Image: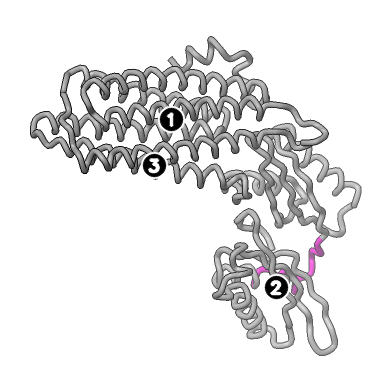
Amino acid sequence: MTQFLIRAFIKNRENTANRHVRAAYGNMACVVCVVCNVLLFLGKFLVGTLFGSVAIAADGLNNLSDASSNVVSLVGFKLGSRPADSEHPYGHARYEYLAGLAVSVMIMVIGVELLKESFLKVLHPTSVLFGWLTVAVLLASIAVKLWMSGFNKTIGGLIQSETLLATAADARNDVIATTAVLVASVITHFTGFDRLDGVMGLGVAAFILYSGFGLVRDTLNPIIGAAPDPALVEHIEEKALSYPGVLGLHDLMVHDYGPGNRLASFHIEMDADSDVMESHDLIDTIERDFLVHDDLIVTIHYDPVVTGDAHVEELKAFLKETVKQLEPKASVHDVRTVPGPTHTNVIFDCAVPAEYLSDKEHRGAKLLSAIRGEVQKKWADHFCVIHLEPDYAHHINKEC
């Protein structure tokens, strides 16, 4: 069914990097989900009202909230697909993140209302009428939600949409919640324990609140500036270092302006003796390669490094191993020396997780002190001048 819908409604479906194709995928997925969720809401709410089950009605309202979420997501895809303009030169793709945040808040509001209603049902239980129609509706709901989970996961994977992947996870969670409601209905019918319906309604409401909180956190992360995907960081590093003449990479930063709209900058180390024009040409090639093949706008800073100095190479190897043992999350780069008649200054940058610069344990300062101590154990006349900086990408530098 998923492939049929793709073939029927998506033109140029192979070109998922295209903004309009991506929007078409998102719009189709949202419309399909709205239709499915509205049908599920009508069926569950009707059965829950007829048979007096607050748990079934609550589960139906959850489907209605899902439909509302799909509408908001649809609006997010529509607005996010708009091209860049003079007022928004980085495009409008972050609308998709804002839509996800709005959806998350809506889910939590509905969860609170269901929690209140279910709590009253626990305090004042009423009899629940059981019928095989109830079982049929809930089983149909489970089957539809299982399909919706797979559908959204497939589309979300194709266009790399966190919104649709979250929708897939939400549908999977709905299967669990609906199964719980079905079990409660059956047990209540055979035991006469009417309060169980309210208890299960509390469980469904709590589950909605938990999911909503998780979605709020996940949608806020890219808006406030989360660390980039480790897989993306590794890809950037491996690709840049694959070019002949690139000796190292550091200070990688990735800025997320919405799905499919990312900018990155980093420093690459190249032999200081190489021709400047050739180095510049290589940097242009790397930047163009990322733009054409990864849809990633990259700005690269050129760091010339001295090669062939045996002592500097020894220092680099020693620092790399020392820092790895002292703090695996840290890395060093831009190592150089300034020899003098009485001592030698060893100057370099040390990148650490951002929290190390401000935490109460002073982990950053302790790390620098430890590095200085280890260097002076090996070379008594060497003094380290270290610039501590945040590692914005949590990546492991391949070279010092």
Looking at numbered disc 2 in the image, what kind of residue is underneath it?
Answer: Leu
Left or right: residue 292 versus residue 317 is right
Which residue lies at the image location 65% right of the left edge and 71% below the top edge?
319
Q: Kindly check if marks 2 and 3 are in contact, taking CB atoms under 8 A apart as contact.
A: no
Left or right: residue 250 versus residue 43 is right
The residue to which callout 1 is attached is 65
User: Where is residue 364 shown, x and y percent of the image?
Assistant: 61, 72
Q: Mark 2 to mark 1: distance in Å?
A: 60 Å
User: Where is residue 268 shown, x and y percent of the image?
Assistant: 76, 53
State the residue in front, 365 or 284: 365
Residue 243 drawn above or below residue 149: below
Which residue lies at the image location 51% right of the left edge and 23% below the top edge?
30
The residue to which callout 2 is attached is 315
Left or right: residue 30 versus residue 171 is right
Name the disc covering residue 284, or none. Answer: none
Specify few, some or many for label 3: CA neighbours under 10 Å numbering under 14, 14-19, or 20 or more.
some
Q: Quadrant of residue 357?
A: bottom right
Q: Quadrant of residue 282?
A: top right
